[in-house]
Amino acid sequence: MMFEGFLFVIHLFLHTYCQLQVAAQCFINLLRWWRVSKWNADILLSQAKPLTGKLPSHVSFVFLEDDLPVEDLVKPIVWCICLGVSTISLYDYYGRLRRKKLEIDDELREYYADFTRDVKNNPKCSLNPKIKFVSVENGRTDLVHAARDMARDMLKSGTGVGDITQVSYNSYHKVFGDNEPELMIQFGKQRTLAGYPPWSVHLTEILTLPTCYLISPLQFISTLNSYCKIEKRVGK
Amino acid sequence: KIHEKLGEAVVSTQSTGEIMSEDWFKRVEYTWFQSFMIKCVRTGRLPKHIAFIMDGNRRFAKVKEITRSESYAMGFEKIGEILDHCEMFDIKVVSVYAFSIENFKRSEEERNELFTLMSEKMNYLLTKMDKLNEKGIRIKVSGNISLFPAHITKTLAQLELQTMSNSEFCLNLCLAYTSRDEMTNSVRCLTKGVLEGKLKVDDINETMLDRCLYTEDLPPVDMLVRTSGEVRLSDYMMWQANFAALQFVRVLWPDFGFWHFVGALLDYQRQEPKLREYRSNYKPFLDKMSQAELKMSAHLEHCSLTSHEACTMNSEITAAYTRAHCLRSEKFISGLKSERHAYLESCAELSSAGA
C-alpha cells in the first residue's frame, strides 16, 4: 500500500509536469504572438535562411493528442510549403484527419492565402506539395498487401525468391514508396509510433512537441533547427 | 580504468560510481533507496519486452580517453547490469542492438575490433553455460548471422542451441540485423511457401509476417530505449516496436545506470494507458479485416470451382476455408521452425576456418 501510494505521488508529479509543459508552451507562444502575428512567408524564409540546404524534403506530422484543432494544425503545413518541403504527411491513429480532409483543405487555403500575402519573391510558395493522410490502416497492412502483390507477380512471372530484395519489396509499398519522411514531428505527451507505417521510419528523425495548439512559427523554426543540427551517421 | 585480465574480480568506473565485475553474472548491489524504488515501481504496469539501442560507445571512449575496445567491453558489462535490473523488475525479455548490417561499412580495423570482442564475449558466455542454465537465461540471436566470420557464426549458433530450452528470461542479441532486412526475409519465406504450393497468396497476413520474423515467438516490444541522445530508430525493430514507448535518453550507453532505467520505466508507466488503448483498438481492427479477407478469399475460391449459379456466400464454406487456412499456416510455421533449427545445427558444426 505504501509503495503504491509513493508511486501514485511520483506519477501525479509526472503528469503535472507534462501538463505544465503544454501550458508553458502555449503561454510562451501567446507571449510571442505580438512578434509573429505579422509574419508572412518572406519573414519565415529569412528566419530559416541558416537552414537552407539542410531542410528535409518530406516531413511527417504525427498527432497523438485527443483534440485536433484544424486551425492550428494547418499552420505547420503551410510553413513547410513555404520552406520548400515537397511532401507532407499527416498521421493520426484513428484516421480522424482523413475524415476532416475537406475542412483541412478549406482551412489550409485560407491560412495559405493569408500567410503568402504581400509575398514579393518566393518561388517555393508556389510549389504544389503532396499532402498524404495516413492512419493505422496504412501501417503494417501496407506491408502485408505489398507482400501479397509481390507473391502474385512472382507466381505469374515464375521468378525465384532470390529476386526478393529490400529494393524490390520497397517498390510494392503504396503509402510512401521510396519517399520515407526524413523528419517526424510528434505532437502530444506520448512518444510512440502508434501504428505508423513501420517500413518507412528506418532513418527518420523523431522530434516531439507537447502540443500543436497555438503553435508559433518561431517554435517551428527552432524544431527545424534541432533537426538540422543532428548528425546523420547511418551505421558508421 | 578497466583491467583486461579476466582474473581481476572487481573494477570500478569513475563515470557511474557503481561497482562492475568482470564476472558478468555478479549481482548488482542496490542501496536501500534503490530497493525502495524497485518495490514502488513494481506496483505499476511494467513492460514485458524492452529493446535497447546501445549507442554512444565510441563517444564514451573519446570522452573518457580510453580505447574503443575498452569502451565496447564496458558496453558488454552494461548488458549484464541491465539484465540484473530487469530481473528485479520481473521483465522477461530484453533485446539489444549489438551489431547492425550497416556496421559492416565501418573501417576494417573497427570491424575486426568488434569481431574480436564479440568472439571473446560469446565464448565467455559459452563457458558460463551452467550459470545461464541455472538462471534460466535463453540467448536468442536475431539477424543474418551468416554474414559474420565462420567462428562467430558457430559460437552464436551454439549459444542459441544450448540455451534454447531455458524459459525464465530471454536475451535477444540482434546481430547482423536491420529491421528492413528482417521484414524482407519474412516476406521471402512466405513467398517461397507460396511458390512451393505450401501456402496460398491470401494466407499471407500480419500474423504470418510476424511469425516469420527473426523474433518469431517473442512478445511485442513494449519499450524501446536508445541512448546517446539520438532520436531515430536506425532500422531497429520497427515492426515489433510499432506500439512501443520510445525513450531517447541523453546519456551514453556505458553511463546508462539504474536511475536512467527507472526514469524510462516511470515514463513508460505514464504513457502506458494510451499505448494500451492503441493496442487494444488494433486487435479488433485486425480481426475484422482478417475475417473479411478470409470470407472474400473463400468466396472467390468457391466461385472458381463451381458454376456461376452455385456461387453464393455461405458461412460453412467460409468456415471450411478458414480451417484449411489455419492448418496450412500452422504447418508452414512448424516447417519453418524446423528449417531454422536445422540451420542453427549446421552452423554450430561449422569448422572454425577463417577464425
Image (spheres, coloured by chain):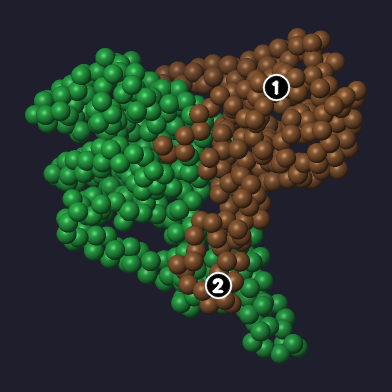
Please tell me whether residue B263 is drawn above or below residue B198 in the rendered image: above
Look at the image and tell me in which quarter the C terminus of chain A lies: top left
Badge 2 or badge 1: first in the primary sequence: 1
Q: Residues within 10 Å of mark 1 (few under 14, many from 20)?
A: few
Chain bearing tag 1 is: A
Please tell me whether residue B275 is drawn above or below residue B208 in the rendered image: above
Q: Residue at x 63, y 52 (%)?
A: A177
What colour do you see for chain A?
brown
Give coordinates of residue B353: x percent, y percent: 17, 56
Left or right, residue A231 beside residue A91: left
Q: Residue at x 66, y 65 (%)?
A: B292
Q: Residues within 10 Å of mark 2 (few under 14, many from 20)?
A: some
Toward the viewer: B302 or B189?
A: B189
Q: Residue at x 85, y 40 (%)?
A: A105
Left or right, residue B170 beside residue B124: right
Chain bearing tag 2 is: A
Amino acid marked by disc 1: Lys
- Residue carrying label 1: A49
Please tell me whether residue B39 is drawn above or below residue B135 in the rendered image: above
Give coordinates of residue A156: x percent, y percent: 59, 77
Badge 2 and badge 1 in a common chain: yes
> From where the camera sits, is residue A188 visible?
no
- Residue carrying label 2: A154
Amino acid marked by disc 2: Met
Give coordinates of residue B223: x percent, y percent: 46, 36
In the displayed image of the protein, which residue is found farthest to the left?
Answer: B7
What colour do you see for chain B?
green
- Label 2 to label 1, Cα distance in Å? 49 Å
State the SS at label 2.
helix
Give coordinates of residue B42: x percent, y percent: 40, 29
> Which quarter of the picture shows residue B276?
top right
Toward the viewer: A205 or B343?
A: A205
